[in-house]
Amino acid sequence: MSADELEQMRLILSTFRDGSGQVILKASGESMPGFRDFERATAVVCGGTTAEDKGIFDVLIPVSGRLPYGVSCKMAVTQRALTHSSFMEMSNSAKKFADEFQRLGIDWTTQPDLAGRATVDLVSGWHSVLGGEVDLPGSRYLLLSHDRAWRNFQILCYSLNLKHANPRTGVKWRVEGRRTPSSVAGYVRDGVRDHRLWQLYPNSGGQLKYYPLLEWAEWTSPSFTLEQPPVRSLLERVNEYFPGRWPR
């Protein structure tokens, strides 16, 4: 993303602070861009389209004479600096993981190694099935990260390759839970510490969380803030767009 494209993205995201943003902050009532808003902004900046559904890719970018690129847009709170990582929620479909474990005969509570490997293989395969429709080598994850105060933002670009750390030889899998098994977690070595790269909650909505290291990002934007546009209520917008037509 060039400097001009980043500024375009920043300005588009800023428009959602006018009251139309998907996220409403509880403390202040301010509106902020949500994940759908980020998808739409990405489509405009990259000259692509978004299907407004939960397909494998959120944005498709046409390329002359070639298959389109796919962009999977993610949005999350910036992780603590000491983790050296980002965060992406990859799935929340418990049934997909349960079906895969059943097909392979895996009991995740006693076989975390097999469950972890199968999980990464399954998610990676979701992209592979679109190989004839989308240019997979040119496709990416695009992450919009923000602090908890929604003041500082950053965009990071990651490869679709979820096996940067080989799930068979480079990840240590374990079952976690204080009293009973609640998740399967995969750890990699980051310097002198263990870093939790994966965490799957099979019984809690099937949430699959991915914490890629910052050094794995192919591109990272500078931190930026959003502009504050005039805030308009719905009625004010109607009167602005269609003056005199509101029935009295």
Image (cartoon, grey):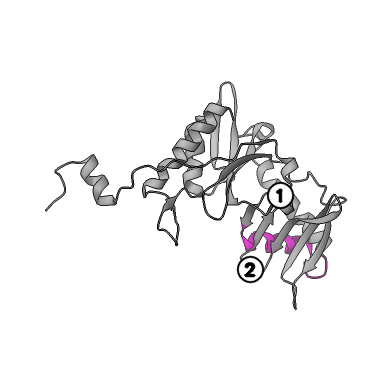
Label 1 near label 2: C-beta < 8 Å?
no
Q: Quadrant of residue 11?
A: top left
Gap between marks 2 and 1, in whole Å?
23 Å
Callout 2, which amino acid?
A: Ser
**Relative image position of residue 221 (x, y in whole percent):** 61, 36
Secondary structure under the numbered disc 1 in the rendered image: loop
- The relative height of residue 43 versus residue 2 in the rendered view (above or below) is below
Q: Which residue is mark 1?
A: 85
Residue at coordinates 66% horizontally, 69% vertically from top-left? 203
Tag of residue 184: none
Q: Is residue 233 magenta?
A: no
Query: Is 217 placed left or right of 11 in the picture?
Result: right
**Relative image position of residue 64 (x, y in whole percent):** 56, 21
Callout 1, which amino acid?
A: Ser
Residue at coordinates 73% horizontally, 64% vertically from top-left? 102
Pick whichever, 226 or 76, lies toward us: 226
Please, which residue is most extreme toward the top here? Answer: 65
**Relative image position of residue 74 (x, y in whole percent):** 58, 47
Q: Is residue 94 magenta?
A: yes
Tag of residue 204: 2
Locate the N terminus and report the quarter of the image it occupies. top right
Pick whichever, 106 or 4, lies toward us: 4
Please, which residue is most extreme toward the bottom here? Answer: 179
User: Which stretch is magenta?
Assistant: 92-111
